[in-house]
Amino acid sequence: MSKVTSSSRAITRARYALRVQSIADGELAYDVSIDDVRRFRIEVSHGWPVEWRLYATTDASCARQPIAIENEYFDILDQLERGEHWMPADSIERPVAAPTPITYVRFPEYQRGR
C-alpha cells in the first residue's frame, strides 16, 4: 500500500512544490516524481544518527551514491520543492530566512542582574 505525501510547510509553499510528489515505498523509503516522472529515491539509514539519503534514479535503477544527506525526510523534500538537485542553479529558490531572530530563555533565574 503506498501513501502520497507532501511537505508540511504548507504556509510557505516553495516555487516548485506542486511539481514534486513523493510516494511511500514501505516504511522507510519514498519514490519522488517530478512532473509525474520518477527522478529520485529517499531512503533512511538504520545507523545512528538517523540519516535520510537522496538518490538519483534513471529508469528503474538507483544511483549508488547519495546526492544529499539530511537528518529529516522533510529537509530533503523541501530542497526538491525549491528546485535543488534538478533545476539550473539560477532557478533554485533560496530558503526564506525568519523575519526576526528567535531567542529562547530557558532559565531566567540565571540571567545577569538577577
Image (cartoon, grey):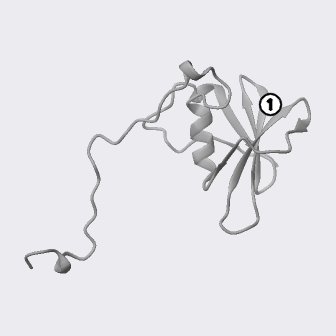
53 left or right, relative to 65: left
Q: Callout 1: helix, strand or loop?
A: strand
Work out which residue is located at the far left of the displayed protein and give it.
113
Residue 86 in the image: state x and y as whole percent: 68, 26
Report the number of discs: 1
64 left or right, relative to 55: right
Quadrant position of residue 98:
top left
Q: Residue at x 27, y 58 (%)?
A: 103
Mark 1 residue type? Arg
Crowd class of label 1 (few under 14; some 14 to 19; many from 20; radius 10 Å): some
Residue 44 in the image: state x and y as whole percent: 73, 56
Quadrant showing the C terminus = bottom left
107 left or right, relative to 1: left
Q: Residue at x 76, y 45 (%)?
A: 66
Q: Residue at x 62, y 44 (%)?
A: 76
In this rendering, the answer to whether 109 lies above or below 97 is below
Residue 17 in the image: state x and y as whole percent: 57, 30
In this rendering, the answer to whether 92 lies above or below 105 is above
Residue 91 in the image: state x and y as whole percent: 55, 19
Out of 60 and 110, give the one closest to the viewer.
Answer: 110
Q: Residue at x 58, y 23 (%)?
A: 89
| Residue named by callout 1 | 38
Out of 26 and 110, give the one closest to the viewer.
Answer: 110
In this rendering, the answer to whether 26 lies above or below 97 is below
